[in-house]
Amino acid sequence: MKQFISDKNIRHLFWIIPLLSMAMHWRIFSTDLMGIHMWRQSQTQLNIQNFYRQDFNILNPRVNITNLGPTTIYRYEFPLMQWSIACVHKLLGDSITITRVCLFLLGLFTVWGIFFLGRTLFKDDVIAGLLAWAFNFSPLFYYYTMNPIPDNLALCGSIWGIGWFFRYQQSNKYRHAAYSAFFLLLAVWAKLPFILFYATVGLYLFTMVAKVGVRYSGKYILAGLIYAAFLLPAVAWYAWVIPGWSGNGILTGMLEHKIPLSESLNILKYHFRHLLPALLLNYGSVLFFLAGIFFLFKNKAYWNGDFWLLAVSGLAALAYFGFELNMINTVHDYYMMPFLLPVFMLAGYGIKHLWYGGTATRYLSVLAFLLLPLIAFLTADNKWSIEKSYCNPALIEYRDELRNAVPRDEICVMQNDISMHIFPYALDKHGPVFSKDELPAEWVDDMIRRLHIRYMYSDARKVDENPAVVPYLDTLLLERGTMRVYRFKTAEQLQK
């Protein structure tokens, strides 16, 4: 077994992982958005579409909601990933398949980053390759690597950033610090919580300055300035956009939206019993994770400086988890993506000791590695389903008919969509979106007369069968499931 998997042939994983992953995801490449967190997927894909169709300015990410304010610009994370995918759309056309292919390639680059990080830390290509294999079949990564959420770029940037940081630590070359700072910038730009990985950089530079003294710490201060300079664009972006995030619970976390202790304990129980072993790791990788913890204490590896450099980011991730516990709850699993890096570094340490621990543990590891793809598929593949999209199923089952019932460029009223993004994406329409069974007749009158809106999509019978609203409806154009498409009367018809 030791000869079968060597430093030389472990590189075959560089084509085995892409081909196997492509085969396992094959049906998803041409599947339109559906599944867990279709809300966030729709918002991100709308950014991509609007860069392609409407406004290519990277500073103006847009959605399709016209009742946000005077424009459809919705600035949240820096939309580098969305804009980059839109560039590919500019070359190849507007297609969900193009988006998914771009995300798949980004995911492969992330897996390569895990190999690079593992190789840098463990000095062993075999362990790095096996770690990359295990990481690739984390069900959380397996699912989201095909879906448009900005966390994909943030995860990729943080892994490569930490990988280059450890390369800098070992080489003391400023260019390695610059590579690290660049990738960490991408991570923070793409998703602010990933700034927690700067804890690793900060701890190292602080301890080195303390160790050698300020007088002899010029090279560390210069490295710190490199990291700070690269971080400035992210600081500038968030300083500009965060004031517009009023009402966003992410900013205040548990400070303003406290939850009962019993609910907190139930959330923690869910994460410990299900999310960590089943989604973050994969049940097959639990063996490596537990082995990593065991050998960490057995070998007293916690005295190693590299351990603390990784652990401080892990502790920062735990602090982030505690602060956002009410927001993460048991539903926002993609908020846990920052944990993938520290969790799999522990797993990598376990892989190393099991692989070289003897014939029995090596064969046990091989069995676990062989099971990982099957377990990932069985855990994650059913997440791409109508049932788990948690929206009106008609939006997915009759997507094309509903889209084509009204010309794409027409402004439409959309009701009811609590997400504010699923309806506009699924229907491929712009317009005011409402989230409750309420639409006063005077609002309808105003939208017809002043805004010249001519159509309404509705799955709310309390609205479209309201006697006060019915006089404004001209024709029922289509009814599929509980979704109805109406044409409003014109202002001229209402005058008569």
Image (cartoon, grey):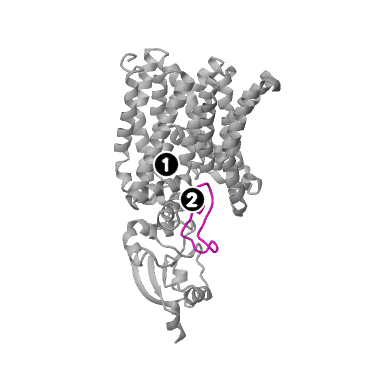
Q: CA distance from mark 1 to mark 2?
A: 23 Å
Give, as a single range, the part of the protein colored magenta. Answer: 59-78
Is residue 398 something that shows in the picture? no
Query: Is 71 within the magenta?
Result: yes
Residue that protrudes farthest toward the top in the picture:
358
Q: Is residue 355 visible?
A: yes
Q: Single out the mark in the foreground, 1 or 2.
A: 2
Name the image quarter holding the C terminus. Answer: bottom left
Question: Along the line of sight, which residue is nearer the eye, 385 or 52?
Answer: 52
The residue at 44%/69% (across/down) is 461
Q: Amino acid at mark 1?
A: Tyr
Residue marked by disc 1:
144
Which of the pair 426/7 is nearer the observer?
Answer: 7
Picture residue at 44% right of the left edge, 78% below the top: 472
Q: Which residue is mark 2?
A: 58
Label 2 residue SS: loop
Which badge, 1 or 2, is on the more N-terminal residue? 2
Quadrant in which the N terminus is drawn: top left
